Image: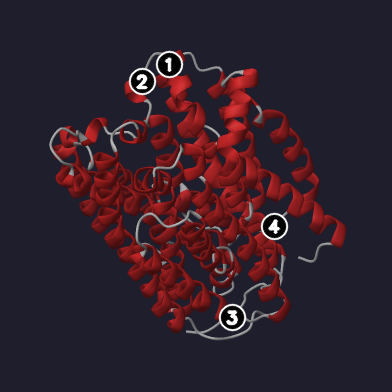
């Protein structure tokens, strides 16, 4: 479907706006969690404001992707936007933590629809050659949301009150909806088929149990529930794979993984979640404890990382669209990520802050080189009728990889620090302020402990990017076509 230049620009503006408020909605809440929990009197359930959102957006990804293929991405996109705005209104009205958590779950589900359908719509109305540039523009919403979300959330909460963190989505959402009605074209759905309810149910159970298991595993009081959740997840995944091989129109068509482009691309996408998204949340703590930095100064390293990702994402998207070549970017990107994380694993403590900032910026540049591009490449390897499904699969492995790796890193750091702390220091009450208020000997010892605990974590993540190098080597070479066809041929098998 060819769009006029004006309508294409309006489409990109509409999708970017919606993607931004969807991405921003998680980061903007983080700075106000304690205030929200205090007002609602439920500090013990604080984590579920984030976990409920993440869990809902994760488990609904494959279902929404399939619905987009069956009913058309425009319908699912507009419906998701309406639900997202309604859920944002409900979040701001919350009078109890239970109310807020339920509203956040609905918000997470609709946010997954906005994210997926934005990428699917771009794929359905553009040629493979155009997609990397437009995907990069829309994909820029995520790193921008990471950069501005916490600051914006704190500013809104301090100025207008925390309900406006959610209500700010309403006028923006209405404006985006009005623009989308005109800008988002009608895209023919795929071949009508029976929805795979058995596959959807088994995968939902599997992913829900997995996310709960990795969320609980770091809490000694939840050890048994965590083990049970892992067992339920494993059993549900077995049922899911059996179902998918037997049904005529599966939720996730496993046969597409016989295509090397799809298999390698999905593996490369997982590297982003496992290798970078998982560590960014721990970087401020690492630098506060190891370098004795303030909370503000410690945030400079993840900011440098995300900024590198943003610039690289836009640049490589433009280059891939201009030349049609895509394989060099994940090769270079995974190599930069592996090298940067390896350097982080051997950096001595106490160096000037600009040194790790530069190193992690290199990791961000490497990751941005294939963050959005790989989605466009994988989309180009399947037929139009499976665009939503394959897009959801790429995003799903990235999100699950991030969730699992984040929990594993948290467990490793928590147990490692607790095991090495000297007598008199309790890991459960150890804060940067407490350490920085202690004597020089205690500060040096804690810094050495955190450095020793994080070094193997950085090394493991470097190895993860090394696996990404192998996947990038296996990614078939080729050029993205400048012609848009209804049933594109796979790039290579």
> Alpha carbon of mark 3 to alpha carbon of mark 4: how far?
20 Å
Q: How far apart are marks 1 and 2 (CA)?
A: 6 Å
The disc label shown at residue 38, or none = 1
Element marked by disc 4: loop
> Residue 43 bears which disc, if any?
2
Q: Do the residues labelled 1 and 2 touch (CB within 8 Å)?
A: yes
Foreground tag (1 vs 3): 1
**Is tag 4's residue or tag 1's residue first in the polypeptide sequence?**
1
Mark 2–mark 4 CB contact (< 8 Å): no
Instruction: Determine the secondary structure under disc 1.
Output: helix
Q: In which quarter of the image is the N terminus?
A: bottom right
Instruction: Say whether disc 1 or disc 2 marks the residue closer to the N-terminus.
Output: 1
Report if the CB atoms under discs 2 and 3 are less than 8 Å apart.
no
Asked if residue 223 lies left or right of residue 266, the reply is left
- Nearer to me, 49 or 491: 49
Which residue is identified by label 3? 489
Measured from the top left, where is residue 373 in percent x and y?
A: 59, 68
Residue 281 on image: x %, y %: 42, 46
- Residue position marked by numbered label 4 in the rendering: 187
Q: In this view, does 338 lie above or below 233?
A: below
Q: What element carries label 2?
A: helix
**Other-residue count near label 3 (Cα within 10 Å), few / some / many at <14 / 14–19 / ≥20:** few
Q: Earlier in the sequence, mark 1 or mark 3?
A: 1
């Amino acid at each position: 479907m060819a769009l006029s230049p004006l309508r294409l620009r309006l489409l990109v503006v509409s999708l970017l706006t919606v993607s931004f408020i969807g991405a921003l909605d998680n980061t903007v809440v983080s700075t106000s969690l304690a205030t929200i929990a205090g007002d609602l009197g439920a500090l013990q359930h604080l984590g579920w404001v984030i976990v409920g959102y993440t869990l809902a957006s994760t488990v609904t990804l494959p279902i929404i992707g399939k619905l987009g293929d069956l009913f058309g991405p425009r319908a699912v996109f507009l419906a998701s936007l309406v639900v997202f705005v309604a859920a944002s209104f409900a979040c701001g009205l919350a009078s109890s933590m239970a109310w807020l958590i339920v509203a956040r779950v609905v918000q997470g589900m609709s946010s997954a629809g906005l994210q997926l359908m934005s990428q699917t719509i771009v794929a359905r109305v553009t040629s493979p050659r155009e997609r990397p540039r437009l995907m990069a523009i829309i994909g820029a919403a995520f790193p921008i949301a990471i950069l501005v979300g916490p600051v914006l959330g704190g500013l809104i909460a301090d100025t207008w009150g925390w309900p406006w963190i959610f209500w700010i989505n309403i006028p923006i959402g209405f404006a985006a909806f009005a623009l989308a009605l005109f800008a988002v074209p009608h895209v023919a759905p795929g071949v009508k088929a029976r929805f795979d309810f058995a596959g959807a149910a088994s995968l939902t159970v599997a992913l829900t149990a997995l996310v709960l298991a990795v969320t609980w595993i770091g809490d000694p009081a939840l050890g048994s529930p965590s083990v049970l959740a892992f067992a339920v997840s494993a059993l549900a995944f077995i049922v899911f794979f059996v179902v998918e091989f037997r049904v005529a129109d599966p939720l996730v068509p496993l046969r597409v993984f016989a295509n090397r482009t799809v298999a390698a691309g999905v593996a490369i996408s997982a590297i982003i979640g496992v290798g970078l998204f998982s560590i960014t949340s721990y970087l401020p703590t690492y630098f506060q404890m190891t370098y004795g930095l303030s909370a503000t100064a410690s945030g400079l390293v993840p900011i440098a990382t995300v900024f590198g990702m943003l610039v690289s994402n836009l640049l490589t998207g433009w280059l891939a669209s201009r030349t049609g070549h895509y394989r060099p970017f994940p090769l270079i990107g995974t190599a930069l990520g592996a090298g940067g994380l390896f350097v982080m694993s051997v950096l001595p403590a106490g160096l000037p802050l600009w040194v790790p900032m530069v190193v992690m910026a290199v990791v961000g540049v490497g990751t941005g080189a294939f963050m959005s591009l790989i989605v466009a490449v994988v989309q180009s390897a399947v037929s139009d009728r499976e665009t939503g499904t394959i897009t959801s699969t790429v995003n799903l492995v990235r999100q699950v990889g991030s969730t699992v790796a984040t929990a594993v890193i948290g467990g490793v750091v928590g147990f490692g620090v607790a095991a090495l702390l000297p007598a008199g220091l309790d890991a459960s009450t150890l804060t940067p302020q407490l350490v920085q208020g202690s004597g020089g000997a205690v500060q040096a010892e804690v810094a050495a402990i955190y450095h020793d605990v994080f070094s193997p974590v950085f090394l493991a993540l470097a190895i993860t990017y090394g696996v990404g190098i192998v996947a990038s080597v296996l990614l078939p070479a080729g050029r993205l076509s400048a012609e848009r066809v209804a049933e594109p041929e796979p790039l290579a098998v």
